């Protein structure tokens, strides 16, 4: 089932994920680490679509997460579904900054904002490299709306 929330306007990739009973902790709400996992799922889907994802174990140029932060807005509980948006907000020389917005369908509001930075890494040399031009173009295309939303 495709969901939409107005706060995800401008996110070229939005995935829908179920909240699982086991996502909750002893405090009766979803554990904070799950929010990071939801953002990771959207981030990986985005990287796959732009061609920056690599086969595992990695060799050649691929992504590596170097920074992540989360601003928690509201607790989420089971049962629920979350919508997770991903978009690129900045491309540096070797880095890509992404924003992820997590929306609870049950609460009908934003429950977390996650920022992450990945670096293009040459895994054979373990050194950062400039973001390849074809990746920059793929990001431009997906951010312009050239890629369809994903529903998982």
Image: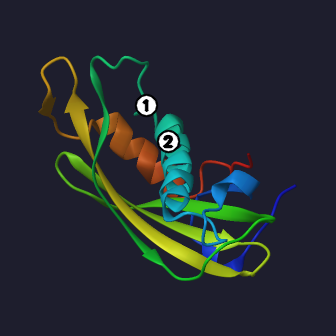
Mark 1 highlights which residue? 53
The residue depicted at 43 percent of the width and 52 percent of the height is: 140
Quarter of the view holding residue 98? bottom left
As drawn, is 103 to the left or to the right of 71? right
Q: Position of residue 94 (x, y in %)?
A: 19, 45
The image quadrant that residue 17 belongs to is: bottom right
What residue lies at 16% left-to-right and 35% top-to-bottom? 129
Mark 2 lies on residue: 44
In terms of secondary structure, where does tag 2 sit?
A: helix
Residue drawn at 69 percent across, 79 percent down? 6
| Secondary structure under the numbered disc 1 in the rendered image | loop
Relative to 122, is 58 on the left or the right? Answer: right
The colour scheme of the drawn protein is rainbow
Q: Find the distance from the CA under tag 2 to the CA under tag 1.
A: 7 Å
Q: Is residue 45 above or below residue 4?
A: above
Nearer-the-camera pick, 141 or 9: 9
| In-image side of 121 versus 140 (left or right) | left
Number of marks drawn? 2
Q: Which mark is residue 70?
A: none
């Amino acid at each position: 089932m495709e969901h939409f929330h107005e706060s995800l306007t401008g996110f070229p990739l939005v995935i829908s994920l179920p909240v699982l009973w086991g996502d909750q902790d002893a405090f009766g709400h979803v554990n904070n680490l799950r929010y990071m996992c939801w953002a990771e799922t959207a981030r990986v889907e985005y990287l796959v679509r732009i061609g920056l994802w690599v086969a595992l174990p990695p060799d050649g140029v691929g992504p590596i997460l170097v920074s992540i932060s989360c601003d928690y807005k509201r607790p989420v509980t089971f049962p629920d579904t979350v919508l997770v948006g991903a978009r690129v907000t900045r491309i540096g020389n070797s880095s890509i900054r992404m924003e992820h917005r997590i929306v609870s369908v049950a609460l009908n509001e934003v429950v977390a904002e996650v920022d992450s930075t990945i670096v293009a890494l040459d895994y054979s040399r373990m050194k950062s490299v400039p973001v390849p031009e074809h990746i920059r173009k793929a990001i431009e295309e997906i951010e312009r709306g050239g890629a369809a939303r994903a529903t998982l």
